[in-house]
Image (tube, rainbow, N blue to C red):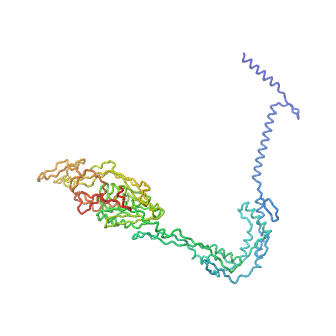
Amino acid sequence: MKKNSVNLKEEKGEKSRSATRKPQISESTGAVRSPASGTALKIIAGTLIAAVVVCGVVAGCYFFKKNPIEKKYHVLNADGTTMELTSEELKTSLSGDVFFQGVKIDGIDVSGKTKKEAVSLLSSALTEKPSEVDIKLSYNGEELPLDISSLKLENNAEEIVAEAFSYARPSEEATAEELVDCYGKMQGLKTAPKEYQTAFTVNTDGLSVIIHGMLDQYDQEVKEAEIESFDTETCEFVISESQVGCKVDIDKAIKDTKDLLDSRTYKGVVTVESEICEPESSSEELKASFGLISSSSSITTSDSNRNHNINITCEKLDGLIIQPGESFSFNTYIGQRTSDKGYKVAGIILGGKAEKGLGGGICQVSSMIFQSVCKADLQVDERHPHEWPSTYCPIGTDATVDYGSADFRFTNSSEYPIVIHAFYNDEETKVTVEIYGHLFDDGVYIDLVSSGGRTGESAGVIYEADPEVPVGTVYNSHPAHDAQSAVCYKVWYDKDGNEIKRDKCCYSYYPSIPAYVDVGVLNPDGSLATMDPETGEITSEIPDESTDPSDTPDTTPDTTPDTTPGTTPDTTPDTTPDTTPDTTPGTKPDDPPANPPENQQENPPENPPQNQPENQPDQGDSQGSEDQNNNSSEEQ
């Protein structure tokens, strides 16, 4: 009930408010209209006004887009008055096919004339052709007669008419500022007329040919001293002499001569300008800045075949010039090592064993190149260490090569050409590779320092049965090599031998290679005995013989290292970096095959085998790398 009473009150209140709204009477018609209808009319009127405004704005934009208001520019007339003209008005005032007021040619006023009319006026007043032309070119105090008799002297009236007509006329692409400038020049003609003069002259192209023929001999480019070649006998660069240059301004001489003729001056002297150009450096300065950058040497062996391979490789490398940015590949440049190229059979590494093959030994050359490249601070692109350290150089400074596989490559990363000087000294059995080029500043030089050692990986022993050797015969076919690693540094020194800095050059890893022990298994009756591959012991019974039992060979291999030539296997891993291939394997009666593979990893002979003949010198670990400062091996 309470709720309904409230509603009733609200309804009564609404009715009372409605009752208070008085109807409005239109003043024009006297019609009665309610307040709601007046509000609607206001909304409609506002909408119509807004639409009219929008339409006006759109129409205005369209109008101004189609008919933009052009900017006007202030210009000055000849009488001192100023005007404001648009770009189009300026172009119109500067156009036309008649001369502007104030243009004269040969004293004749051609204002308001067409070009054709001007040429006609000038033709009737042309001067006579000159009877003699005497013009000389003065160069370096000497007067050179200019003979232009081969050229035809012609009046240049049409050329001058065209030049005079184009004065103060704008180009098609002229800007507003350029139009204003041309208008000012055109108005200036009215108070200060411009005069042109015709003359008997020659064609510029023909004159250019004659003057070039006279002066080209004096125009010399400056010549800098240059490296032409390298003398491997004297170890010196062959350098060409520098030459002072002279820049003759021939173009100006041609223009000045043409201007002289165009001014109706047929006798006179044209001074030829020139400039002396000094070279930036002399041959003496170049010689002083080029020389030996680095050198690496090492002792070879008494193996004549191996030394022969080293020698012919050095002969091919000697004198090779490598330009800045140019790369060198050992395998590409030397090529495949074949007998047709003169290579002989010598020690190589094949499958972790010392074997023989064509080209054996040339890794010693590639290793010396690698060392010298590092000492010359050049960019090494590819380098591989051997399967075990080499005795002819410090550990970590070798570089093996194998045609079609391992290569040694570097790039001349300097700004100057370099030369490789490689040679073999037979009397000293020594190979040397030197690099010549631009010397380091202030006597600075680089040396190599390397350090390395065993990694703890034991090499072990592998026993192999030999069916061609009598049972009981045991020999070492290859010594063991424990795994080793090494780091090589480039050490920079000043001229007094003080260390400046050291940079890491390369890292080398030499894997462990087990000793190979061959055990004979051929029984006296032609049958084959059985061998235990773990111990190398003969496990089968040896057939009885009529000989004394004491003659039966001992089939148990001795694991004590062998220090004298014999048949006992050496099962103790080699603890010394040994890089000399065992080219005379123990007591095995047969030699290596007569035609070994050509493309295997080349390496110099290892330490002498136990059964080495007495007339072969023991190089052993006494071999060391000798560098430019002869201290590389001592620093190891």
Q: Is residue 417 left or right of residue 133?
A: left
Q: What residue is at 76 percent from the left and 60 percent from the top?
A: 88
Query: So how many labels did they put on this image?
Result: 0
User: Residue 290: x and y, percent?
Assistant: 45, 66
Counting from the top left corner in percent of width and height, residue 103 is at 77, 71
Q: Nearer the viewer, residue 216 or 19?
A: 216
On the rendered image, what quadrant is the N terminus found in?
A: top right
**Is residue 90 or residue 383 the one in the foreground?**
383
The x and y percentages for residue 147 are 63, 81
Q: Measured along the vertical axis of the image, is residue 632 above or below residue 214?
A: above
Which of the 4 image quarters holds residue 37? top right
Residue 448 on image: x %, y %: 39, 57
Q: Quadrant of residue 291?
A: bottom left
411 on left or right of 456: right
Q: Residue at x 33, y 67 (%)?
A: 425
Q: Would you say 219 lies left or right of 109 here?
A: left
Q: Is residue 374 something that shows in the picture?
A: no
Side of 170 where 406 appears, left or right: left
Q: Residue lying furthest front in this view?
A: 496
Farthest residue toward the top?
A: 1
Q: Name the residue: 68% across, 83% down.
A: 132
Can residue 443 be seen here? The reply is: yes
Q: Quadrant of the C terminus?
A: bottom left
